[in-house]
Amino acid sequence: MSSPAMILLTEDGSPTLYAPRFQATYHSRHGALQESNHVFLEAGWRFRITQPVSGPLRIFEMGFGTGLNAFLTCLATAKMRVDTKYISFDLYPVEPAITDQLMYTGMEDPEAKALFRQLHQAEWEQDASVAPYFTLLKSRQDICSASFLPPSDLIYYDAFGPETQPELWSESVLSVVASALAPGGVLVTYCAKGDVRRCWQRAGLQVERLPGPPGKREMLRAIKPF
Ligand SMILES: C[S@@+](CC[C@H](N)C(=O)[O-])C[C@H]1O[C@@H](n2cnc3c(N)ncnc32)[C@H](O)[C@@H]1O
C-alpha cells in the first residue's frame, strides 16, 4: 500500500494534495482554486452552458481527487439551476481522513461545507443526488482500460501530467475520451502539450489554445463539431 496523500497549501492560499504514489500534486502549486476555476469552471462549464443542451448537462471528469472541480461545479450549477449529471472516475480515491481536512473558500458557509462532505461521502458506483440539480456518480474505474466512456456534453480531463502518467495521455486513451464527447460537446484540460492537441485534432475535435491559469502559459479547449 502506498503512503497517504499529504495536504499542502498553494500560492493562492487554497489547499491541494501531494500524492507520494505519483510524486505529483493534484493541482498547480501556483493556486489550486485559481486553476480549477480558470480551466474547468470558466473555460469549460461557463462556456458550455452558453450553448443549448437537450436534457441534463452530462459532465465526465477524469480524476475525482480532492473533489474540488465537482464542488465548484455543483455550486455553480445550483446558482444557475442547470440540471447536471456528473460522472467522475478515480482509481485511487483519497482517504476520507484526508478529504475531511480540506477547506476551500466558501466552506465557512455550513451549507457549502456540508455539500463538500456529501460529495465525498457519496457511495462509489452509485448515483447520488447530492443537491437539487446535481447527481453524482463516482467510479473506481481505470481510464486506461475503458474502451467506452459515458457520452458527455462537457469533459474535464484532469489526469496527472504526461510526465507523471504518460499512459493517460496516449493516443488510444485520448481518442476514447474524444469519442465520448457528444456533438457540440466541450473538453478542457490544463495541459497544452502539442502532442495532446494533435491527438484530439486527429480524433476530429477543433482544438484551441487558451491562456492558462497563473503560472501556466496555455491550456487546451476542444470542441466536437455538430
Ligand atoms: C490531478 S488528480 C485529479 C484532481 C481532481 N480533479 C481534483 O479536483 O482534485 C488526478 C487523479 O487521477 C486519479 N488516477 C490516476 N490514475 C488513474 C487511472 N488510471 N484511472 C482513473 N483515475 C486515475 C488519481 O487518483 C487522481 O485522483
Image (cartoon, rainbow, N blue to C red):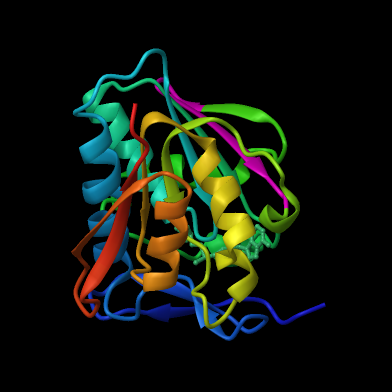
Look at the image and tell me whether residue 140 can be seen: yes
Residue pictured at 28% horizontal, 73% vertical: 31
Extreme residue in the right direction = 1
Q: Which of 110 and 132 is in front in this view?
A: 132
Q: In which quarter of the image is residue 173?
A: bottom right
Relative image position of residue 118 (x, y in whole percent): 53, 40
Q: Position of residue 89 (x, y in %)?
A: 62, 49
The relative height of residue 70 versus residue 181 in the rendered view (above or below) is below
Point 39% across, 53% down: residue: 201
Q: Where is residue 191 in the image (x, y as percent from the top left)?
A: 38, 68
The segment highlighted magenta reads 130-141
Residue occupying the far front of the picture: 202
Q: Can I make out residue 63 in this image? A: no
Q: In which quarter of the image is residue 13?
A: bottom left
Front residue of this view, candidates 93 and 164: 164
List x then y, in percent, for residue 149: 62, 39
Q: What residue is drawn where x is 48% and y is 32%?
A: 152
- Above-or-below relation of 92 to 120: below
Does residue 194 appear to the left or right of 143 in the view shown? left
